[in-house]
Image (cartoon, grey):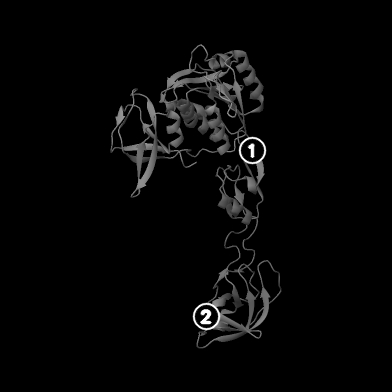
Amino acid sequence: MKKLKQVEMKIFISIEEALDLTLSSVDTVGTETLPLDQLTGRILTENLYSKVDSPSKDASLKDGYAVLSEDLKGADTDHPTDLKIVGRMTAGSQSEIVITNGQSVRITTGASLPEGADAVLAEEFTKEKNGMVSCCNLADTGRNILKKGSDICTGDGVAEKGEKLHPALVGLMATAGLHEASVYKNPSVAVLATGDEIIAPGTPLPDGKLYASNMVEICAWLSTFSFPHHADLIADREDDIKSAITRQLPHVDALITSGGIWGSEKDLMKNVLDDLHWDGIFYRVKISPGKAVAFGLLEGKPVFCLPGGPPSNEMAFLQLALPALMKMRGDTDPLFPETSACLTETVTKRDISWIKFVHATIEKREGKWIVHPLKSGSRLQTMARKEALIIIPGGCEKLHKGDEVRIQIVNGI
């Protein structure tokens, strides 16, 4: 992990600067070689090339009869051509059959073509009887034949370093004779949620307490991308927080804390990290929700300090922490694609210089996105139901109904 030269922590910076500082502070965390069934979604660390021709021999695309095309010139329903059947071949079978003029071989889809044959006549144009086949159609050279190496040839490129593997590409790797590949490791993450008021789900809820929904959602996102993770609930005591951080840090690649970062008498996280001599990079960002976020390095490992309020916690995680974790696994593609959409209701913000994200649902009409701001008395309900985020950019006080606006689509993951 990168070690930055110690500089004064930046305060209340733009989201663009915060993201740039975050991404420039992290790097990939190593490589590992995995079998095909564990590669989906992972990022290659090497170029891959085919080890084989596929198919390894000319093969039939149809159930029918392997023939010499010249034997069937002029064949039709009124003037069928009769050929002697000298063998049968199925997919995967081995045979030394060689056919000459006047002969054919019964063949199934995927079977290798017998030597001498240059076409396959589909069975719907044939009638077999007493060791002979009556052919009622032409079969030009190459008809119904998948040529050797037509899917992939030895030495052909299969995938490139930095490419994200998806199921069809993994299937092509198998076709190419590959059974494993080197990919970037997924970073392991410790999630530490602080607060005397939060408890783990699954236990009775005392008056005045809250279930640790922030921690659960963060872990759900980590699970979505197969990031190994461990989560702990920590009391609002400096010794407990420091102990949890020092205990977890040696065993993970990144640390995420939830709560305790704003600055009240119980917001102890930054004090603890300062005592541990972290390299604090920024503290507070001009983003709504999510401003009370901090980021730095501790022993060279990234530490993301997220606010305790659920909307702020989620937004800081989605806009800053998650993109950094994705880069640490070699994935630099935009996580939430941006596009334009027609706004159905006016949306506003108080701080003109800040960027604001508004929860919304989306639909497509006549090929264009329509975006609907979510309205609810419950912030958790709108978080749970959002499909996109409306972006109110810095320098803009409001976006009007009917405007073409920028949105992030977040429901495609």
Residue 58: quadrant of the picture: bottom right
Circle 1 is placed at which residue position?
Answer: 31
Q: What residue is at 38 percent from the left and 34 percent from the top?
A: 374
Question: Residue 32 versus residue 265: which sits nearer the camera?
Answer: 265
Label 2 sits on what residue type? Leu
- Would residue 34 be visible to someone looking at this image? yes
Location of residue 168 in the rendering, given as x and y in whole percent from the top left corner:
56, 52
The span from disc 1 to disc 2 (Cα, nearest Å) is: 55 Å
Instruction: Depth check: give the residue in front, 206 or 244.
Output: 206
Q: Judge whether residue 3 can be spotted in this image.
A: no
- Determine whether the residue tagged by mark 1 lies in a helix, strand or loop: strand
Local crowd size for mark 1, using a 10 Å CA cut-off: few (<14), some (14–19), many (≥20): some
Comes first in the chain, label 1 or label 2: 1
**Position in image of residue 1 (x %, y %):** 60, 28
**Residue 179 drawn at (x, y percent):** 67, 51
Residue 20's tag is: none
Answer above or below: position of 58 versus 223.
below
Residue at x-position 39% and y-position 36%: 360
Q: Secondary structure at mark 2?
A: loop
The residue wearing badge 2 is 138
Residue found at the very far top of the displayed protein:
265
From the top left corner, tell me how far across and down residue 220 is, in percent. Answer: 55, 34
Q: Is residue 152 left or right of residue 263?
A: right
Front in this rendered view, residue 45 or 390: 390
- Amino acid identity at mark 1: Thr
Q: How many marks?
A: 2
Q: Residues within 10 Å of mark 2 (few under 14, many from 20)?
A: many
| Whether residue 159 is situated above or below residue 127 in the rendered picture | above
- In the displayed structure, 339 sits above or below 79; it is above
Callout 1–callout 2 Cβ contact below 8 Å: no
